[in-house]
Structures are given as structure tokens and as C-alpha cells.
Amino acid sequence: MDGISNPPFRIGVSDMEEIKRCWEFKACGREPGGTNAEREGVCDAARLDSTACWITAGPQSADVEGRCTAVLEGQDCEECDYYRYFMRESLAELEQAEEEEERPPECWSRAIG
């Protein structure tokens, strides 16, 4: 897997709970083998198995045919319900990780009282 044509964009995914991909969340059918893949093409986010579709299939994507359907229709990624979902879930995971780092080990809690 090279970093240019097939980047490992799995931003915000924890080992405990995997965040949905945009094509699962939006049910656009542009994943490989999806209902719209043959007619509209496979979206680059799905082709690359990316959770960061605004990077891999957003307006700056060099492959116009691989861009998100909503982007092709003029929608800004920051207005997208999937983008908001992803950011909310990622933030929740970061906050949880910070809480767990600040929390003393359970054995300390028992010893202190």
C-alpha cells in the first residue's frame, strides 16, 4: 500500500468502536459493488476505505469522478451530516481518552478510600 494512491486514512477510529464510513452512513451506493457504483462510479473514499471522505473524495480531489456525490452537487463538506457525525464521534473518543488518562488506576481508588 503506497501513501499516494492508497493512503491509510483511518483518522478517529478507536480499537473499541469503529466509526461508520460515509457510504455506510449516507447509503449512497457508491462503494465497490454498490447499487450506484456502475452508473456513477466508485467514490474515492470507498475505494480507499477512508473515514476522512472530505480529504479523499472532497472538492480538492484530483479524480473528479471519484468525488462524493454531494460535493459534485455543490455541497460543502462542513455542511454534510456525515462530516458532523464523524467530528462529533472523534471528539467524543478524544475526550474519553483524555478522561481515562487523568483517572487514577482503580487500585489507587480502593487504597485511598
Image: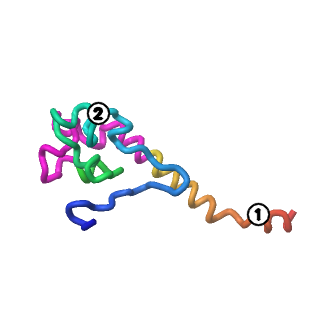
Residue 85 percent coordinates (x, y): 42, 41
Q: Residue at x 28, y 41 (%)?
A: 31
Q: Residue at x 37, y 38 (%)?
A: 24
Q: Which residues are magenta?
A: 58-87
- From the viewer's perspective, is 22 left or right of 90? left
Above/below status of 79 relative to 113: above
Checking the image for residue 106, the label placed there is 1
- Does the magenta run of residues contain 67? yes
Residue on which the image places disc 2: 28
Q: How is the image coloured?
A: rainbow
Amino acid type for the residue under numbered disc 2: Cys
Q: Residue at x 30, y 43 (%)?
A: 78
For the C terminus, the quadrant is bottom right
Mark-to-mark CA distance, 2 and 1? 45 Å
Counting residues from the N terminus, which is met first, the one under dot 2 or under dot 1? Answer: 2
Above/below status of 75 relative to 2: above
